[in-house]
């Protein structure tokens, strides 16, 4: 997991990386250094910015229909000082598949405060509710084995 953009050690955060890793593990994802299917990156913006994005359906709604041909209207976002952006890239699809950010919901993030960083990551990834492929089935099988010795 690497920060987006130019390699800048001041924009790297062990707290963010550990928080993302813990959340993804909870969702059944396994971390690998070689040829991962999902690449997660983040960027901390110390200044305000205009961000070009798209209006998109709620993730839960999209997961029910899985319509690839849905229209996404372009939208400009004005993000305040202290924004954390997290993006997911699917290597198999060769494209970004999800992004989330914290600023307006959480308020300015103090990038030097571990609690602020953890809370920002949690507020972003709470909106990502996609379990790893096969994870739910594996959990159900484990529960059956426990209840039927």
Image (tube, rainbow, N blue to C red):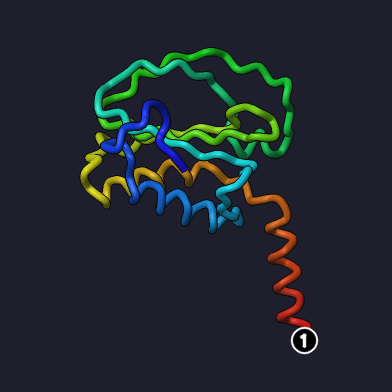
Quadrant in which residue 106 is drawn:
top left
What residue lies at 36% left-to-right and 34% top-to-bottom?
84
Which residue is disc 1 drawn over?
A: 149
The x, y position of residue 148, in whole percent, is 78, 83
Q: Considering depth in this image, is 8 or 26 the residue closer to the camera?
A: 8
State how many labels appear: 1
The x, y position of residue 73, in whole percent, is 57, 14
Q: Considering depth in this image, is 149 or 31 the residue closer to the camera?
A: 31
Quarter containing the C terminus: bottom right
Image: 130 above or below 45: below
Q: Seen in the image, is 123 located left or right of residue 37?
A: left
What residue lies at 62% left-to-right and 27% top-to-bottom?
95
Circle 1: element type: loop
The x, y position of residue 127, in whole percent, is 50, 42
Image: 149 above or below 138: below
Image: 35 above or below 104: below
Q: Considering depth in this image, is 119 or 43 the residue closer to the camera?
A: 43
- Which residue ends up furthest to the right in the rendered image? 148
């Amino acid at each position: 997991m690497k920060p987006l953009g130019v390699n800048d050690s001041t924009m790297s955060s062990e707290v963010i990386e550990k928080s993302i890793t813990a959340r993804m593990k909870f969702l059944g994802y396994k971390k690998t250094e070689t040829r991962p299917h999902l690449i997660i990156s983040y960027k901390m913006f110390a200044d305000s910015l205009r961000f070009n994005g798209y209006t998109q359906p709620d993730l839960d709604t999209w997961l029910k229909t899985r319509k690839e041909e849905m229209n996404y209207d372009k939208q400009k976002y004005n993000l305040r000082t202290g924004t954390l952006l997290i993006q997911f890239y699917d290597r198999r699809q060769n494209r970004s598949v999800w992004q989330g950010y914290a600023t307006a919901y959480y308020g300015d993030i103090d990038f030097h405060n571990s609690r602020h960083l953890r809370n920002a990551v949690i507020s972003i990834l709470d909106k990502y509710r996609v379990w790893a492929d096969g994870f739910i089935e594996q959990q159900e099988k484990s529960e059956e084995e426990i209840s039927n010795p």
